[in-house]
Every structure is written in C-alpha cells, then in structure tokens.
Image: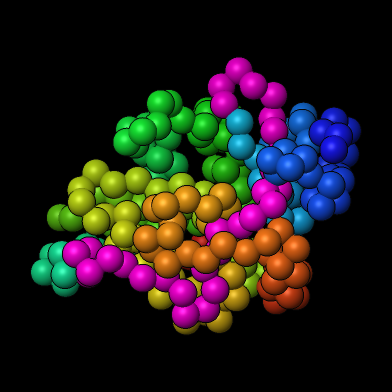
C-alpha cells in the first residue's frame, strides 16, 4: 500500500487506503483546518521529534461506546475516600504540557512535540480541543485532553502527578459525555491500559461508520468550562 505525500491543501486520501500498520500519509501541517479535517475522517497525527508529520488510521481502533468505561475497583475505592475537584477547560496549556513531560513506565520520551503543543493549543482556542483536570487543594494533579467533533470525542493523552488523578479526570469525561449524549470516545490504538478502563476494539470500517453517524450531530464548540 502507498504512503501518500500531502499537498498544501488540507485534503486527505481515503483512510481505508492506509498501510497495514495504519500509516496513511506524510507531510502537510498542523493547522486547525487540517486537523479538523483529519479527525473528521478518523485520521490523527503521530510522530516524534525530528520526523516529518505522519498521519495514521489504524486497522483496529480502541473505543468507548455509551455505557462502556469502568475504573478498576481499587481506583473507585480510592476516589470515594478522597475525591478530586474536577474542572474543564481551565488550564488546557498546562495539561498538554504535563502530558508531554510526565514520565511514563516503559516509554522513552514523548510524541507531544512543541509543534504539537502549539497546534492543539490553537485547536483549543478555536473551540475544538478540551481538557478535563483533577485538582487537590487547588493544585493540578492530573488530567487529559482531546478533540471534540459532533458527538465524538477523540482522546489524545493523560497524565497523573498523584495516584488516580488521571482516572478521576477520565471518569469525569465519560460522565459528562454521557450526559451530553455523545456516541463515541476514541482511544486510538488499542493497548492494555485502555482495556483496563473498559475500551473495546473495533475494526476501522466499524469505527468510520460510527464516526460518520456521530458527525451528523452539531459540534459542541467553544469553552466547556463550568
């Protein structure tokens, strides 16, 4: 399968033409217009420092559908004893910066480059990207960020400075999106951590079908801060 070189215009090839590992295209930019177009087609950027921009549409997708999502019993008990204060869209830039910098077990470095931070900051300013934040005594202890289009939310990354902080933010995300009748939360590539949270794995074709239906709903654009 070919890997496509993107032109200056924010246009993508059919995601079903991705290589077996999910790589679809290379190049382009991270403008708001191009990123919105990519997510609407089930495509996302993922690359490292010093690499050209790489665009992906994996053959299998980790997703949370309505009613999915569960915290492990240990997390539920801990959060019941000491709940976090949850806020939305109040410190987006700090959330993405922490996601880029907080070390993760088994992971060397980060794919969230300065270019990515700036691009998703612009998406946030345009009302498409959002953060859920967990606080303890007024201090940001964990959170997550992602992109919202229609009735779909595309999760990007999360971090914790205290045990269960990111889990609290994730539960708040699911509760909020359920109340707003969202149809789909995308976790991108399946992995063990997402499985422990209740994600299911579906094919690209099934994902794109669900995404098309979710995009028929108007986007809840703008700040989600309470």
Point out the image quarter for the C terminus: bottom left
Q: Is 145 situated left or right of 186 in this image?
A: left
- 24 is higher (above) or lower (below) than 101: below
The answer to whether residue 174 is magenta is no
Give x and y (percent) for residue 105: 32, 36
Q: Residue at x 57, y 43 (%)?
A: 120
Within the image, what quadrant is residue 138 found in? bottom left
Q: Residue at x 20, y 51 (%)?
A: 163
Within the image, what quadrant is residue 25 found in? top right
Indicate the colouring scheme: rainbow
Q: Is 9 situated left or right of 141 in this image?
A: right
Number of marks drawn:
0
The residue furthest left is: 81
Give x and y (percent) for residue 104: 34, 36
Q: Residue at x 56, y 22 (%)?
A: 49
The answer to whether residue 66 is magenta is yes
- 47 is higher (above) or lower (below) than 152: above
Give x and y (percent) for residue 108: 40, 26
Point out the image quarter for the N terminus: top right
Residue 204: tell me if it is visible: yes
The residue furthest top is: 50
Residue 225: tell me if it is visible: no
Stretch in magenta: 48-76
Give x and y (percent) for residue 96: 44, 42
Q: Residue at x 80, y 50 (%)?
A: 15
Which residue is nearer to you in this view: 165 or 97? 165
């Amino acid at each position: 399968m070919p890997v496509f070189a993107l032109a200056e215009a924010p246009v993508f090839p059919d995601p079903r033409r991705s290589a077996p590992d999910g790589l679809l295209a290379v190049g382009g930019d991270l403008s708001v217009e191009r990123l919105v177009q990519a997510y609407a087609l089930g495509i996302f950027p993922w690359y490292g420092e010093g690499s050209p921009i790489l665009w992906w549409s994996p053959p299998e997708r980790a997703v949370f559908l309505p009613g999915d999502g569960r915290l492990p019993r240990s997390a539920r008990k801990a959060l019941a004893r000491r709940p976090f204060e949850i806020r939305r869209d109040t410190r987006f830039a700090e959330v993405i910066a922490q996601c880029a910098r907080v070390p993760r077990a088994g992971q060397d470095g980060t794919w969230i480059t300065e270019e990515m931070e700036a691009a998703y900051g612009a998406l946030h300013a345009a009302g498409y990207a959002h953060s859920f934040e967990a606080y303890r005594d007024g201090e940001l202890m964990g959170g997550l960020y992602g992109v919202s289009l229609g009735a779909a939310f595309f999760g990007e990354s999360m971090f914790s400075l205290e045990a269960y902080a990111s889990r609290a933010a994730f539960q708040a995300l699911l509760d909020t999106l359920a109340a707003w009748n969202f149809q789909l939360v995308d976790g991108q590539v399946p992995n063990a951590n997402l499985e422990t949270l209740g994600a299911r794995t579906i094919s690209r074709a099934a994902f794109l079908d669900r995404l098309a239906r979710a995009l028929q709903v108007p986007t809840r654009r703008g700040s989600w801060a309470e």
